[in-house]
Amino acid sequence: MDFQVVVLAGGASKNLTPLVSEEIPKALLPVANRPVLSYVLELLESSNLKDLIVVVEGSDAALRVGGWISGAYVDRLHVEVAAVPEDIGTAGALRAVAHHLTASDILVVSGDLVTDVPPGVVAATHRRHGAVVTALLCDTPISGISETGSKDKAKKLGRYNIVGLDPTRQFLLLIASGAEVEKDTRVQKSILGAVGQMEIRADLMDAHMYALKRSVLQEVLDQKDSFHSIRQDVLPYLVRSQLRSEVAKIEEGWNTTITSKTNLIWLSQHREIAPSAFHNGHELDANGSLSAQSTHKCCAYIAGKNKYCARLNSIQAFIDINRDVVGEASHLSGYSFSAQNNVVHPSAELGSKTTVGPQCMLAEGSKLGDKCSVKRSVIGRHCRIGSNVKIVNSVVMNHVTIEDGCLVQGSIICSNVHLQERCVLKDCQVAALWKVPQSWRLKFKLSYLLSGFV
């Protein structure tokens, strides 16, 4: 593919505090003991996309990410790491590196995306329809897990995206997200009149993989200097401005209320309501393509239900993706799983009567004492875990010490943490370098410890 590739790797994401730090920017957060950025880089490499621009917010984070890429992908990828100011947003990041973009089409991928959807299918859809933007959409991930490890009681994320598609499900006609779906959402008569029907979906997630026509992207970024986000600003603008015609100029938009409870509905507009929208040639042709009279086309590629697709953009997503990559999406991990459906590094040491269950990972150099139990969890490198310790549905990063009799459930323990004996942690996140005193019982739902205990 003659696409120029830009990977937006973020920086010190505030909604991932306390997992991120100066030492570990978002791109280097571990998923199954690998930096999350490695999943996108290897996906691109497998598609023979090896010339990349990786954009990182903050100069220190860019140095760390660049250093890791240089070591991990030497002689495999040609990567230019570009540092941009923090909190510049995804649109701002593209604006900052625009002078490096020369190809006719650009593939923009979020560095926190973990998926097995090949970028080639998005690029092919983009080229086939001559679109200005093509977005990858996938099923909204299931979030959370029950005590038994089942997803039966888990629910999809509470904030929904509303997506409007033409009857062929190839063209993106409406997009709204988050709080927007709780108010009236405007649907242009010209767009609805052009296709006759619009399928409204609330079960799809924008995966943040976009194919974009560079000339149009450049024009939008230049003219709309207030645009901060691709997802919140650029994409909705392109969707709203397609199919502009004389009809669109003289007709007012049609308001319809689409709530977050909507799953699947159809909005229909008949010819007698806006006959000129059809007579002007804006309807689908025999090949299922929009007429050439439209100003531009916005397309969507919907991943199949057998594909995995998730973004590490929240603390809950960090837990979910780590769980999935050693579970149902283990093919993404890059590891060979044992007959017990787990990965225990040969250098790891297990004490007497210690069990490491299915869908677990234990990295090199870590040691577990006697009578420990590990279930559906990931344990990092060179950890020291005492006897009678239980770890369930958790992620333990590198160089963590857990003394005897501790219980860690549904929690994230960052690197170099020290849990003294008989601590109980449920649904906690403990920042790097902190010490939790013995016998402490902590139960905070998606909260975290930022103060150190000595």
Image (spheres, rainbow, N blue to C red):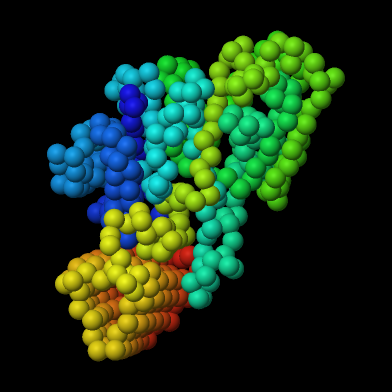
Residue located 80% across and 16% down the image: 275
Q: Residue furthest front?
A: 286
Of residue 415 and residue 306, the one placed in the foreground of this image is: 306
| Percent x, y of residue 146 | 53, 71
Give the number of marks.
0
Can residue 301 be spotted in the picture? yes
Q: Residue furthest right?
A: 272
| Percent x, y of residue 436 | 33, 77
Residue 15 vs residue 383: left or right? right
Q: Quadrant of residue 181?
A: top right
- Asked if 59 appears above or below 21 in the picture, the reply is above
Residue 205 vs residue 96: left or right? right
- Asked if 429 appears above or below 236 in the picture, the reply is below
Instruction: Specify the quadrant that holds the N terminus.
Output: top left
Residue 154 vs residue 187: left or right? left
- Asked if 418 appears above or below 207 in the picture, the reply is below
Residue located 57% across and 65% down the image: 154
| Percent x, y of residue 334 | 29, 55
Q: Quadrant of residue 86?
A: top left
Residue located 63% across and 32% down the image: 168
Residue located 49% across and 20% down the image: 130
